[in-house]
Image (cartoon, grey):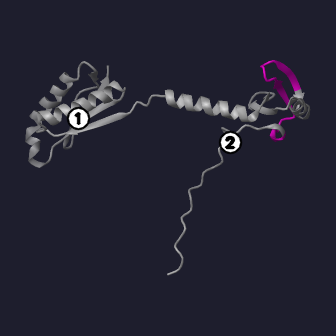
Amino acid sequence: MGRPRRRNKPFKPFNQSNKHRVNNRIRAEEVRVVAENGDQIGIKPVAEAIDIAQEVGLDLVEVAPNASPPVCKIIDYGKFKYELQKKESLAKKNRTENTLKEVKLRYCTDTGDLNTKLRQARKFLENGSKVKFSMRFRGRERAFMKLGREKLDNIVDRLSDVANQDGNSNYNGHQLSIILEPS
């Protein structure tokens, strides 16, 4: 037998975008220095700017590396990272994902089950998601396409208070579907 093969983890390149150069890692010769309170100190050599930051007991953090000369701020790096993390989490929390939820049903779905599916679709629409109603026809069921279209039209009418139909119902292959978007 032998030992089991070890799977390698996929290679992830080092993400430089969220890393900020601090103190001795700043590569530029001269930098524009900004104090902790936002006052401009001026353009200084990196060594002098680091000395100024260390006198105050803080770090020199490169905030805008693409500027000419790069902008560095005298701040506490730990606090700076915490603030960035807080901003990212707040932005992530406030971001609304425009997702498409799918509700599957059949042409013969009865009223009780249909009411349950409509209630669920109403929740999705009130949360801001689009809802796709799809109806699948198997074999001889394709003869009942008219019943399926009527049921989908009924659904659109019943959800008209919270949703608008996004385009017409489309039929591809053996599936009939409509997409409703929140109004």
**x then y, percent, for residue 45:** 90, 31
Which numbered disc, 1 or 2, marks the residue that appears first in the sequence? 2
Amino acid found under the numbered disc labelled 1: Ser
* Residue in front for this viewpoint, 82 or 121: 82
**x then y, percent, for residue 97:** 43, 31
Classify mark 1: residues with Cα within 10 Å, few (<14), some (14-19) or many (20+).
many
**Please, what secondary structure does the residue beneath circle 2 have?**
loop
What residue does disc 1 label?
177
Amino acid found under the numbered disc labelled 2: Gln
Asked if the magenta segment contains residue 27, the reply would be yes
Q: Tell me what residue is drawn at x 32 percent, y 30 percent.
A: 124
| Magenta region | 24-43
Q: Quadrant of the C terminus?
A: top left
Left/right of residue 119 with respect to residue 149 in the rendered view = right
Residue 24 lies in what quarter of the image?
top right
Distance from the alpha carbon under mark 1 to that under mark 2: 44 Å
Q: Tell me what residue is drawn at x 21 percent, y 43 percent.
A: 173
What residue does disc 2 label?
16
Residue 100 lies in what quarter of the image?
top left
Q: How many labels does the image show?
A: 2
**x then y, percent, for residue 83:** 66, 30
Placement of 139 over or under 18, stated as above or below: below
Left/right of residue 22 with respect to residue 171 in the rendered view = right
Residue 86 lies in what quarter of the image?
top right
Left/right of residue 162 with respect to residue 21 in the rendered view = left
Asked if the magenta segment contains residue 61, the reply would be no
**Please, what secondary structure does the residue beneath circle 1 have?**
strand
